[in-house]
Image: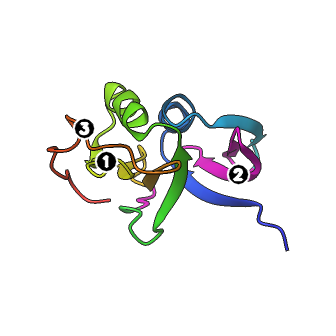
Amino acid sequence: MKYLHTMVRVRDLEASLRFYCEGLGLREARRMENAQGRFTLVFLSAPETPEAEIELTYNWGSDEDYGSARNFGHLAFQVDDIYEKCAHLQAMGVTINRPPRDGHMAFVRSPDLVSVELLQAGDPLPPAEPWASMPNTGSW
């Protein structure tokens, strides 16, 4: 058996691509537009693991409520510097829901409320401000 991808429905394809590509550093592997079915599929992967993909599904003109995505769980990515990644996302306007107070783990949410866990590669970084004293915000 081979793992292929996880599909996530998105309301705003451009906002989601900005979050996943510019924010997290994923790359677009391929795209498929289906005019008859009125949807666009965009497959993204991390540079280090191109074989594991996230499929963003955008249904044209849909006003379906996808909910808070709490039933999904979360996506998880290992990062080289958790403080740097959180600072980058925060500068983009992303809320750091669970700051990396321990230098090891943080949670953010995509524009479609998908929870994303960020884990520090290797040993945790030493606690540092502003993260060490930052409270949780919302849910993840």
Q: Quadrant of the N terminus?
A: bottom right
Question: Compared to 27, does 109 lie above or below?
Answer: below
Quote the CA–CA distance across marks 1 and 3.
9 Å
Which residue sits at x=28%, y=40%?
Answer: 95
**Is 5 placed left or right of 109 in the picture?**
right
Q: Which residues are magenta?
A: 37-66
Number of residues whose C-alpha sits closer than 10 Å to that of mark 1, classed few (under 14), some (14–19) or many (20 or more): many
Q: Which residue is mark 2?
A: 53
SS label for mark 2 = strand
Q: Position of residue 130 (x, y in %)?
A: 20, 35
Q: Nearer the viewer, residue 59 or 55?
A: 55
Q: Nearer the viewer, residue 123 or 83?
A: 123
SS label for mark 3 = loop
**Is 140 placed left or right of 56 in the picture?**
left
Question: Compared to 17, does 76 lie above or below?
Answer: below
Q: Quadrant of the C terminus?
A: bottom left
Q: Which residue is mark 1?
A: 100
Confirm whether the magenta stretch covers residue 38.
yes
Q: Nearer the viewer, residue 14 or 139?
A: 139
**Residue type, mark 1 in image:** Pro
Q: Earlier in the sequence, mark 2 or mark 3?
A: 2
**Residue type, mark 3 in image:** Ala
* Rendered image: mark on residue 128: 3
Confirm whether the magenta stretch covers residue 13.
no
Residue 63 appears anywhere in the view = no
**Residue type, mark 2 in image:** Glu
Do the numbered discs 2 and 3 sit on residues whose CB atoms are within 8 Å? Answer: no
Q: Earlier in the sequence, mark 2 or mark 1?
A: 2
Quote the CA–CA distance across marks 2 and 1.
25 Å
